Image (cartoon, grey):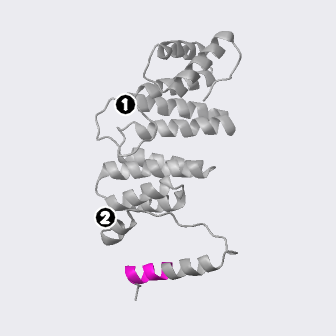
Amino acid sequence: MKPTYDELKQQVIELQKELDSRPELQFHPTPHIRNLRNYIDDPTPENMFYVAQEYEAFGQTASAIGFYHQCAERTSNDNLSYECLLRMSICYREQGDRKAHEKNSLLMAIALIPDRPEAYFLLSLVYERIAHSEDNQRWWDSYTYACIGESVADNKHQPLQSDIDYYGSHFFLFQKAVTLWWVGRCDESRKLFEEILKRNDYPKSIQKLIENNLSNLIKNKGRNMGR
């Protein structure tokens, strides 16, 4: 028979006492997940999502991915499943060198809801990183997904529950401006940077990058574009 919740709780208490009595033992404490009891009592997809968010916030990305994956598979809410797939890709990014898993999660999200922009945005960023570090040909992939994302950016959808650092269609303009330079369409890149420099709806960090990139273009310093 499986142990009950109270039995498991007592085992944890006893284990903690043993660890406290043996300071020579080193271990990584498990973070206190507030929503874990809610999930145990009521294992709905929504509660899986909340638990996953807490694990992610603690940096426990492997556990977070597991709960996001379960939620994405079990929920009948496509928007929730879509968001789980996005968050899985972000967790893979945080783990480092997991670009294939990032891409797969985002492609599944696109297949689920093709007319939402967020997955295209994240996928454009993935290919930008690949292009910088591994394969320059991937600049075209980054540019293409930015163009597709921009084409659906104004569609109306239920807002996501979490922040993925995407705040609107103007983020695709920045992606296009960067990638146009790297694919050799420098005049278009310069023109687009000049246009978006006039906007005031970018975060300060992105605004600074826009200014620096345009300055490099004007001074013809070469391909010093990027984030």
Where residue 219 sits, quadrant-wise, is top right
Q: Residues within 10 Å of mark 1 (few under 14, many from 20)?
A: many
| CA distance separating discs 2 and 1 | 31 Å
Tell me residue 138's x, y (percent): 60, 35
The majority secondary structure of the magenta stretch comes to helix
Q: Residue at x 53, y 29 (%)?
A: 143
Looking at the image, residue 200 lies above or below residue 47: above
Q: Which residue is mark 1?
A: 153
| For marks 2 and 1 on the same chain, the one whose residue lies earlier in the sequence | 2
SS for callout 2: loop
Considering every residue shown, the one lying at the far bottom of the view is 1
The type of residue carrying mark 1 is Ala
Q: In the image, which is nearer the foreground, mark 2 or mark 1?
A: 2
Tell me residue 97's x, y (percent): 63, 49
Answer yes or no: is residue 82 visible. Answer: yes
**Left or right: 198, with 209 as reference point:** left
Q: Point out the image quarter for the N terminus.
A: bottom left
Q: Residues within 10 Å of mark 2 (few under 14, many from 20)?
A: some
Q: Nearer the viewer, residue 207 or 188?
A: 207
Answer yes or no: is residue 100 visible. Answer: no
Q: Over which residues does the magenta segment extend?
A: 4-12
Looking at the image, residue 23 lies above or below residue 171: below
**Left or right: 199, with 190 as reference point:** left
Q: Which residue is mark 2?
A: 44
Q: Nearer the viewer, residue 78 or 19?
A: 19
Asked if residue 7 is among those painted magenta in the image, a careful observer would answer yes
Q: Residue at x 53, y 60 (%)?
A: 62
